[in-house]
Image (spheres, helix red, strand yellow):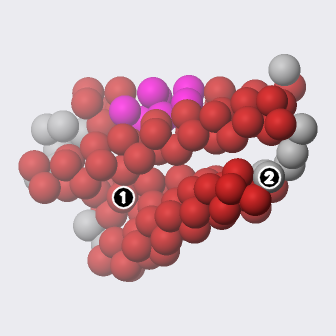
Amino acid sequence: MRKFFLPCSLLALAVILGAFGAHGIENSVSAKALATYKTGNFYHFIHALGFGFILLLEDKFQFNFKLPKILLIAGITIFSGGCYLYALTGLKMFAMIVPLGGLSFVASWLLLSLKCLKS
């Protein structure tokens, strides 16, 4: 059960940041910035759930999907974190890193699919 600490913590953080976006900044940022924030939050949720899914696969098939998990965490940090920071600050440098997080997500899921196909 300890292994589920990280995805559960990531999900709790997604809820907290989602509430902050819905109630804390909705009147202080533009509609476009709020949409960016919500996109980051949505991807945060989906990929934190995906992390838990990977852990369930590991338990079922007795396999370690280390790199896909690392890439998901990197993706949440870079993609969602970049969206959050860009929405809050308006600094373009945060928007510039977001695609790298998206690539991390894609790489994670492709690696996982290849490992599943091979086993």
Q: Residue at x 25, y 30 (%)?
A: 22
Q: Tag 2: residue type?
A: Ser
Query: What amino acid is labelled 1 in the image?
Result: Cys
Q: Residue at x 34, y 72 (%)?
A: 95
Q: Quadrant of residue 102?
A: bottom left
Determine the secondary structure under disc 2: loop
Residue 113 visible: yes
Residue at mark 2: 119
Instruction: Between residue 72 and residue 5, name the one nearer to us.
Output: 72
Residue located beneath label 1 in the image: 83
Kindly report which numbered mark, 1 or 2, lies closer to the viewer in this rendering. Answer: 2
Location of residue 18 with respect to 117 vertically, above or below = above
- Decide if residue 87 is on the left or right side of residue 30: right
In percent of width and height, residue 103 lies at: 49, 71
Q: Which residues are magenta?
A: 11-18
Q: Which residue is drawn at the image coordinates 46% and 37% (left, top)?
A: 45
Q: On the picture, is 115 further left or further right than 29? A: right
In the picture, measured across the screen, residue 29 lies left or right of residue 54, that is left
